[in-house]
Amino acid sequence: MATLTYARATRQKITVCSGGHSFSANHLRDNSMLILMKGFNSYEINADTLTAKAGPGVGGSVLMLELYKHNLFFPAGHCKGVCIGGYLLQGGYGWNGRKLGIACQSVIGLDIITADGELVHANAEQNSDLFWAARGAGPGFFGIVICFHLKLYPIPKYRAIIAHDFYMNHLEDVYTWAYEVGPVIPKAVEFQMIMSNNMLNLLGPGIEAIAPIFADTKDEYEEAMAFMKNSPIKSKAVIATPAFNPGIDMLYKTTMTHYPEEQYWGVDNMWTHAPLNDLMPFIKEIARTLPPEPSHFLWLNWHPGHLSTDMAYSNEDNTYLALYSTWKNAEDTPTYGDWAANMMRQMAHLSTGIQLADEGLHQRTAPFLSNSHLKKLQEIRAQRDPHGLFYEWHSRPVIK
């Protein structure tokens, strides 16, 4: 509160950072005061009411590992080190997200310091405008969340992963299969494919098809495994694992092999429901130009149902595509720094927007909310932060 008062008096803007995992570094701005929330890292779990309270500096993986000890679950993010503050504000694509919904749908309240320096609680009944805005505004939110109130879930009884790994000469077969089977993959599966120039950090260029499963019943578990077990291209895989449970800690460790620390990053993404014939030439171009590992191309099968929660978040589609270019040395920035954004520009006519998280709004503007929701969000901003104390996003579409 004192910092906001000082910022207003000195005519500086405010940016907020929970953990620093921002590919576009939205929190680093000129003439601004950066408030780092990583010290707000305490949490309380109430197993009886299936709720939790957690500060924005709590690591999603830290919370998840603790919840597992209580046989509880939350759709926390996939990467270690990512704090829940930015993750939940922007939406939150996490474990078992297709079934439980994006993580901000499990936010039932927030404690917020507003632009005028007041500490308020926001939920469906109190300060409902802030509650609506906070779930989806991402780094464009005009307040400082100091505590999230979360809905928890019983841990899924059946947890496993299946992986099929293919060399690049099977590219067309792999993406054709993924595209065709996508609409019928059960919600208990978060099916994704990762293309890189060193599959499993060992086998050279290839595509990893990965199916994490979180099922509540034996029947649901069997149904979730079927599309991988019966895959018509399974025989073409260089490696095809049975279903096994590696444990949540190993899932995090495996994910982090694709996102090493102390690297430079160029990242962009898009939602799409375009026909595969339209996407395929670009997928082949991605394969041809993909920078060295651990750079990669992510295909995530989403196929959402109707988004029934009324909140700022409003943009998703059948398939999510994301490009991650990463390099170790600064002198390689001219070579790799624009690759992801330039590739997405070429595919923009097939896109229905982007998600806030693995984006580069400092390089390429794209819609991340529906036009009507962006308009409503900006109307709330005008009321709650009339003097523009908080920075918005790097860029945003023009409101129509």
Image (spheres, helix red, strand yellow):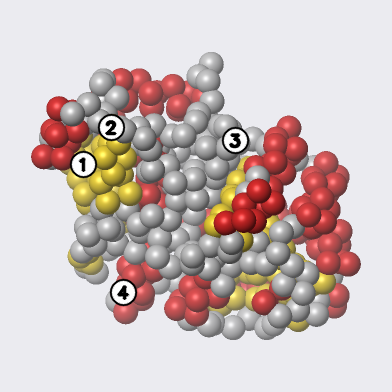
Q: Secondary structure at mark 1?
A: strand
- Give the amino acid type for the residue marked by disc 1 in the picture: Ile
Q: Earlier in the sequence, mark 4 or mark 2?
A: 2
Q: Position of residue 349 (x, y in %)?
A: 73, 32
**Residue with the mark numbered 1:** 112
The alpha-carbon separation of the residues under discs 1 and 4 comes to 25 Å
Does label 4 or label 3 sit earlier along the sequence? 4
Callout 4 touching callout 2 (CB < 8 Å): no
Residue to which mark 3 is pinned = 364
Q: Is residue 399 visible in this depiction of the protein?
A: yes
Are circles 1 and 2 on residues that touch, CB within 8 Å? no
Q: Where is residue 337 drawn, in percent x and y?
A: 63, 49
Of residue 293 and residue 56, the one placed in the foreground of this image is 293
Q: Residue under label 4, please give it.
A: 66
Which numbered disc, 2 or 3, marks the residue closer to the eye? 2
Q: CA distance from mark 2 to mark 3?
A: 23 Å
Quick check: can you spot residue 272? no
Q: How far separated are the C-alphas under marks 1 and 3?
A: 30 Å
Given residues 121 and 31, the one toward you in this image is 31
> Is disc 2 surrounded by few (<14), some (14 to 19) or many (20+) residues within 10 Å?
some
Q: Which residue is mark 2?
A: 13
In the picture, the quarter occupied by the N terminus is: top left
Please state which amino acid type lies under the numbered disc 3.
Arg
> How many angstroms separate mark 4 from mark 2 (CA)?
36 Å
- Give the residue displayed 65% in from the left and 45% down from the top: 338
Local packing at callout 1 (Cα closer than 10 Å; few below 14, some 14-19, many 20+) is many
